[in-house]
Structures are given as C-alpha cells and as structure tokens.
Amino acid sequence: MPVSGGSGEVALHVGREYDHAGDDLKGLLQGASDAKFDFVVIPLFHQRSPEKLTSGEYELLPSTASDLAVDSKTWNSAVVGVLSEWLDPGTHSTEERRRLCGDALDKELRWASHLGVYGILLPSPITPRCELYAAALNRQMLGGICTTQLMVRIPLVRDNNGPQVDGWRIWNNLRMLCDHNARLQVAIELTADLPSTDRELERWFAEPVRAVIVPADIFITNKQGFPVLSKRHKAFLLQMFKYRVQVVLQGLTSGDGCESENDKYLHYIAWLFQGRPPLTSQDQFYLPYHDYLQAPLQPLQDDLESQTYETFEKDPIKYVQYQEAILRCLQHKVAAKKPLPLSVIVVGAGRGPLVVAVRKAAERANTEVKIWAVEKNMNAVITLQHRRRLEGWDNVEIVGQDMRFWDAPQLADLLVSELLGSFGDNELSPECLDGAQRFLARDGVCIPEKYTSYLTPVTSPKLWNDVKNYTDLAHFETAYVVKFHQAFYPTQEIKECFTFAHPNWELTSNDRYEEIEFTSEVESLVHGFAGYFHCELYDGFAVSINPPTYSEGMFSWFPIYFPLRTPVHLREGQSLKSHWWRCQNDRKVWYEWAISEPSPSPLHNPGGRSYYIGK
C-alpha cells in the first residue's frame, strides 16, 4: 500500500527485491502485498556465470515458465524485472565475451519488453570505462526494441576489490556515451560507505533517479532494538523523497516467522517519509512550475493577460517592499521642503498595485501626492479607470499611452516602475526608464534605483533534455524562466553580471559585456547557467531572487536558465570561463553567451538569431 504524503504530494511506493522469483510468482506477489509492499523486484532469468556458458548464441532461461505466470496487468504494475548482472563485458574482454554479453542484453531486453514489466533494472557498469556496455545499450534504445524506461543500478560507491569508485562518475560516463538519452534512468543503491563529502552526494539531486535501493545490511540498530539508518544515509534519503523516488528494500530475510522483523524496515521508511514537514502554501504553489520551461514575458511586444496580472498582484512581499521604499522617499522629500503635492509617475502601472502602494505610503507619510498612472495595455487601462471610480482615486490620473512616447504635464519628484524580469534587465527596464526619465526632475528619484544580474553554473539533465527534445538549434539559444527543482550547482559562487542604475542622465549605452569565471567544487556536468537579480529600490529596501539576498516569500519572479548546446564536464577544481553580451539595435535587445574554458563552445544566439526581446 503506498505511503501517503502531505497535501499536494505524491505517495511513496515501496517495493521489495528478491534474489529469485521461485516457482510461484503469484504466491510471491501475494506475500509481498500482504506485507504492504507495492511491487516486487525479481530476476527475470536464472542466474548463470558467463564463464560457464558455452560459446555461440545465448540461451534465454526465464525465471518463470512463461508470461502466463501472472496476467499482463500484474506484470506492468507490480513487477520490476532485473537483468543478468554480468551484461557489461568490461574493457579487457575477449571478442567471444563481448558477443555473448551483447546477445544476452538483446534477448533479455526483448523478453522484458514482451512481458511489459513495470520497470527494467539493468546491472551497473563495472567501472567508469563502460564504452562497450554503453554501445550495446545505445543499439537497443535506438533500435526501438525496448520501449520501456530503463533503470541502471548504480551504487553510491563501487568496490571492485581495489580502490573505491565513485558511482556518480560511472553514471556520468555511461549517460554521456549514451548521448544523454532521456529513457535511461537511475536506481541508486545505498552503500555502507558513502562519498566523502556531502557535495558529492548532492549531485544526485539533479539526476534522473527513479528509485533508491536500500539494502538491509546498511541499517544499524538503535537503543530500542529497531533498524535505523545512519545520519548521513537518513539525510540523503529524506532529500531524495523530494524528487518522487520509489524505495526498494533489498536483502530482507525470507522464510516463516520473518514477517515481523521485515515489517520494522518498512515501517521505518514510512515513518521517515511521513515525518517530513508538510508543504507550505508557497511550496504547493511552486509544484506545477518545477523544472518547467517558460518563455520570458515580452511586455513591450505583448499585452499581459488578466490572469498574469492577478498572479503577480498576490505576491505578499514585493509590494510591501515597494511601499516601504516609496514611504522613505516621500519622507525625505517632505523633509527637504519640496512643494506639495509631490508629483509621482507610475510607469507600467498594470492594474494598479503600485498606485495603491503610492497612495498608502502618502497616507502614512501624512503628505499629499499627485499620481499619473501610465499604462500602454488598454485592457489594463479599463481596470485602472474602474478602480479610480470605485476606490476614490481622486489624486490619480490614468494615462493610456506608452511611457516612452508620452509627454508628462510636469516633472516628477518620483518615478516608480516594476519592469524587472528574471534576469533584471531582460524585460527592457533600462530602455524604458531611459526613455521615461525625461519627465523626472533633476533632483527626482527612480524606484528602483539600481539592479544587478547574477549567474552560476547549473546541472539539470531534465531541463537540458527538454530543450533537446525540440530538435533545433533555436531552443538551445533561448533563455527560459524556470523554477529549478531537480538541479545541482557545481559551485557556490554566484557572480555579478550586468548592473544598471537610474536615472541614467548621461544616457550611457545599455550594451554590456562581462567575462565570468567559476571554479567547480566537485566533478560535475554543467548543462547551462542559472540567472538571478538583486534590485535596490531605495535607501536599503530591496527585492531579490539572488539566493544570498533572496526576499523570503516572494514569488513574482523565478530564475532564468541559459542552456548550453553541449554539456561541459568539469573536474574538481577546474575553471569554467564564460562570456556574456547584452546587445541591441533599433528593433530588439538580445543576449549572447559562450564558454572559452575548459574548451571553447560555439557562440550562442549571435545577432539575436534565435531569441530576442522586441522593443
């Protein structure tokens, strides 16, 4: 029976792995079901040593008499099939051994596909040198013989009677040799020894892990005599629960009288899963957006829809920060003996949240203001006019024009906008405010005053494969708004990219170029860059999605993702040197990016050929 989670969460399915299927598969399944397991993991073939097999074709010996052992619904909902553990021929094998392994892989995959099992579990490569195994797997996946998702058993640490081998390195080599095939997934096997650092473990949080195999012999016994996991094993498994993995218990005792002892392991896993803190309302809001590619908004080219405005207006943090910044500015203007009413122009007023913030700030400052709300979207203007009548905005004038071409009746003491995108300037805030500053008094204030974009390398096979599935170059040269979830960051460095300040009285160019270098803290595979921004509103008040200064609780912006056409493999301590351009002409603004170290990449998006922001 699946272990239920909290509100909005998917239940946890727990399976049991058996060493052999036995003669009574129905009885085995019934026993597992009675013990509250959701599925079984069984070898589909009688285990034989390859050394004892004669030369020639591989003879298939299924562990069940035929596919009639259970009905098709049971095969595809309750049975994970394990293939022979010797299918990787190794790097120094003979031609005869390579042919045998390739023939066995082909026939075993065909049988597993014929059964329609719930999942197919492939053996782990012996070492990171798995070219022959990967080549055979590639032929099967590309040949269309096997259409089921494949899981590769990968131990966290592999011990080959010598130096221990990092399981992630084995997996990374295999998936790169298989051209990042999205049908290849991972079944991680917890090992008694873990990688030496938590950063090495954290890499798995970005990988396509479908199941976590937990052997009974890695449990320790607590003071009450119950099996529990060590602190590091427990912390790792708890983190993996966030990625909707299934759990497989391995090595439980079989035979009469063992049920109560085996129950302790299952109850412990269920207790861990159900003991996690419930999702907050904000976490539940994020769920549908996890690792989902969204095109950035183009508010100058396109008018936003009512639903988009409504979502942004629900942000509990952004408008509070804006109101506090506006209040501080109004207080400073009053203290400077500026004549009343103070003139405030809200550019890009949308449906009015910033107008409300200005009015409330003026009330708190006990001062008079005259507000012009400038909005080019005529659908939003209708809402503004309605709110002016309904809410008594007697000090507000609604202007249905583009801020860049409107002539203000007087110079403003304060210019307020919320034109920022996920990368700060990617919705053309610099261009808009440069055009609007002509109606700002020389001692006037812009809110925001300054914003800076930030970048860091990111590992995200899920997002990279989603881009790859478009099968064209243009999508690899496009930036996406993404709520990163199944992601890993090879370095904790998050570095500044572009900075803009307002007012820009000298009208200095908004073109930019930056060279940014990162150092990988652990061996990793980089699929692109995550981008953020930090925005100074006024006098210390800020809004930020940059992780070190993140505005807790704010959800108006998700990070931005710049993909790389080819993932970059970094060794621990190796440098990644990146190059970033912000370019423009009279019609559009665009970004270009490239890698020069450890090896040069093609320039992405030259001339804005694939992705740009229209003026």
Image (spheres, helix red, strand yellow):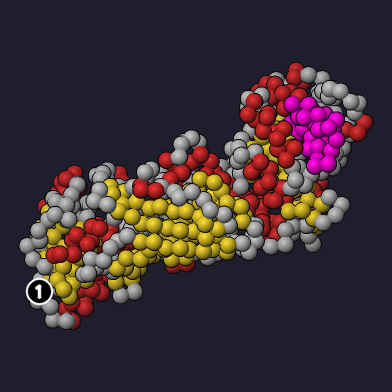
**On the picture, is 388 further left or further right than 140?**
left
Q: Which residue is mark 1?
A: 340
Residue 117 makes an appearance in the image: yes
68 versus 227 height, above or below:
above
Assess whether residue 90 is covered by the magenta stretch.
Answer: yes
Residue at point 9%, 76% (across, down):
339
Residue at point 66%, 52% (across, down):
237
Bin the neighbour count of mark 1 within 10 Å (Cα to Cα): few under 14, some 14-19, many 20 and up.
Answer: few
Q: Nearer the viewer, residue 229 or 6?
A: 229
498 versus 184 height, above or below:
below
**On the picture, is 451 further left or further right than 42?**
left
Residue at point 63%, 33% (across, down):
149
Q: What quarter of the picture does the N terminus occupy?
A: top right
Q: Residue furthest left?
A: 409
Assess whether residue 127 is covered by the magenta stretch.
Answer: no
Residue at point 43%, 66% (across, down):
496
Residue 40 makes an appearance in the image: no
Helix, strand or loop status at disc 1: loop
Q: Position of residue 95 (x, y in %)?
A: 83, 32
Res 520 quadrant in image: bottom right
The region drawn magenta spans 80-106
**On the picture, is 41 further left or further right than 257?**
left
Q: Position of residue 203 (x, y in %)?
A: 62, 54
Res 341 quadrant in image: bottom left
Q: Nearer the viewer, residue 306 or 589?
A: 589
Q: Residue furthest right?
A: 52
Residue kind at label 1, given as amino acid type: Leu
Q: Position of residue 281 (x, y in %)?
A: 44, 52
Q: Nearer the viewer, residue 180 or 599?
A: 599
Q: Position of residue 92 (x, y in %)?
A: 83, 41
